[in-house]
């Protein structure tokens, strides 16, 4: 088997598991690549195929479906999406994209795959709407347009179709600029006690500890708390990690100088890092998660000392998860909320700092 067919077969298998088995692309792909012992170049190629095809599946399906008369199974759909992604988004020469993708498909469907991909290769690229062209569910597209206007919304969504940019902190930890800004907002001082209530995998918690604060980072899930502990070993500072629900954190009330609540959210500002998230989140999720965030914010107030700081942050921008949640707390605020719209350099973020009355 040629290297081109082998890499596409691995990518096709991963895409089928995501489409048919509900697997997460970022979790399923790594072990598959490791087992195959691919070169660095081939690892990058497979990753681009899987992540890109997953992100752009709505646009790809539009290009494919004009040449399909009947519905196809998950294997064929995944293979056709992968081939079409190479043709229209990777600028792979048609003969290479078609031949190798056909070779990676099951024998019984190779004729169909070959016929469809050759027609896709020759067809003009026309999309009925920006939502289809950019490959987002209508509700996400409409939400961004409502928040930021058509032009800025399209720019933001286009930026999240690109690969994530790596930003390395001084301590070697790779962290998006928006997350680094949240750490700066906490304004950790040496010797302070800071709680990071939803801390895993630990990027913000390690940044706070690196400033000299004594940090306790918690996560609801033991596996993620252990991941945070491993990441803490790679950086300097005092960071204790534990598995705990933020609503019942094992610490006395009113003792923390600062509490960071980087709450679980829809993640609509960081979709480039989770290629399949846009297809997993439903339109009711912002309201549903807003209710959870309101509970967590109320719980977080119990841990802040008089005169201390509470920072509420989410990597999304929906009203239900930002201003609606923040408005439930009547503490004084420090300035206006910090809002970052997704761009080529940074993820999206919304954050607000509160002060507990003395």
Image (tube, rainbow, N blue to C red):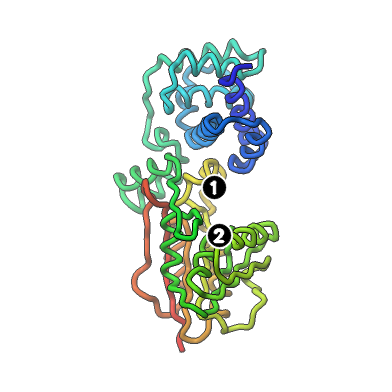
Is 116 in front, or is 227? 227
Residue 54 place in picture, x, y as percent: 53, 35
User: Relative to residue 179, is residue 304 depicted above or below?
Assistant: below
Is residue 149 left or right of 66 when viewed as pictured? left
Is residue 124 left or right of 183 when viewed as pictured? left
**Disc number placed over residue 264 in the picture, else none:** 2
Residue 251 place in picture, x, y as percent: 64, 79
Q: Residue furthest left?
A: 151
Please tell me which residue is depicted at 58% across the width and 64% down the height of the picture.
198
Please tell me which residue is depicted at 47% across the width and 40% down the height of the picture.
137
The kind of secondary structure element at disc 2 is: loop
User: Relative to residue 199, is residue 133 depicted above or below?
Assistant: above
**Disc number placed over residue 282 in the picture, else none:** 1
Is 137 in front, or is 342? 342
User: Relative to residue 139, is residue 46 depicted above or below?
Assistant: above
Please tell me which residue is depicted at 44% across the width and 63% down the height of the picture.
322
Residue 288 place in picture, x, y as percent: 56, 58
Is residue 100 left or right of 93 when viewed as pictured? right
Residue 329 visible in the shown view: no
Please tell me which residue is depicted at 57% across the width and 23% down the height of the picture.
79
Q: Quadrant of the N terminus?
A: top right
Q: Quadrant of residue 279?
A: top right
Q: Residue furthest bottom?
A: 358
The kind of secondary structure element at disc 1 is: loop
């Amino acid at each position: 088997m040629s290297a081109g067919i082998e890499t596409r077969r691995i990518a096709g298998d991963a895409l089928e598991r995501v489409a048919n088995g509900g697997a997460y692309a970022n979790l399923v792909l790594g072990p598959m690549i490791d087992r195959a012992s691919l070169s660095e170049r081939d690892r990058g190629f497979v990753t681009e195929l899987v992540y890109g095809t997953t992100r752009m599946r709505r646009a790809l399906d539009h290009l494919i479906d004009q040449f399909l008369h009947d519905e196809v199974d998950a294997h064929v759909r995944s293979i056709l999406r992968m081939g079409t992604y190479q043709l229209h988004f990777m600028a792979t020469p048609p003969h290479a994209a078609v031949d190798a993708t056909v070779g990676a498909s099951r024998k019984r469907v190779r004729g169909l795959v070959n016929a469809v991909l050759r027609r896709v290769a020759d067809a003009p690229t026309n999309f009925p709407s920006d939502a289809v062209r950019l490959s987002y569910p209508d509700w996400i597209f409409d939400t961004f347009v409502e928040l930021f206007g058509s032009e800025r919304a399209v720019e933001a969504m286009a930026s999240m179709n690109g690969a994530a940019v790596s930003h390395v902190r001084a301590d070697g930890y790779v962290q998006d600029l928006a997350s680094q800004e949240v750490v700066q907002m906490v304004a950790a001082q040496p010797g302070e006690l800071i709680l990071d209530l939803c801390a895993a995998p630990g990027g913000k918690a390690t940044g706070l500890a690196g400033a000299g604060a004594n940090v306790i980072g918690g996560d609801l899930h033991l596996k993620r708390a252990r991941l945070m502990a491993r990441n803490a070993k790679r950086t300097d500072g005092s960071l204790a990690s534990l598995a705990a629900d933020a609503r019942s954190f094992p610490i006395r009330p009113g003792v923390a100088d600062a509490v960071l609540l980087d709450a679980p959210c829809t993640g609509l500002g960081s979709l480039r890092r989770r290629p399949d998230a846009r297809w997993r989140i439903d339109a009711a999720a912002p309201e549903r998660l807003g209710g959870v965030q309101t509970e967590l914010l109320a719980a977080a107030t119990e841990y802040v000392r008089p005169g201390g700081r509470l920072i509420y942050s989410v990597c999304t921008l929906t009203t239900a998860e930002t201003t609606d949640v923040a408005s439930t707390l009547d503490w004084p605020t420090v300035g206006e909320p910090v809002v970052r719209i997704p761009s080529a350099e940074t993820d999206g973020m919304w954050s607000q700092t509160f002060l507990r009355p003395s």
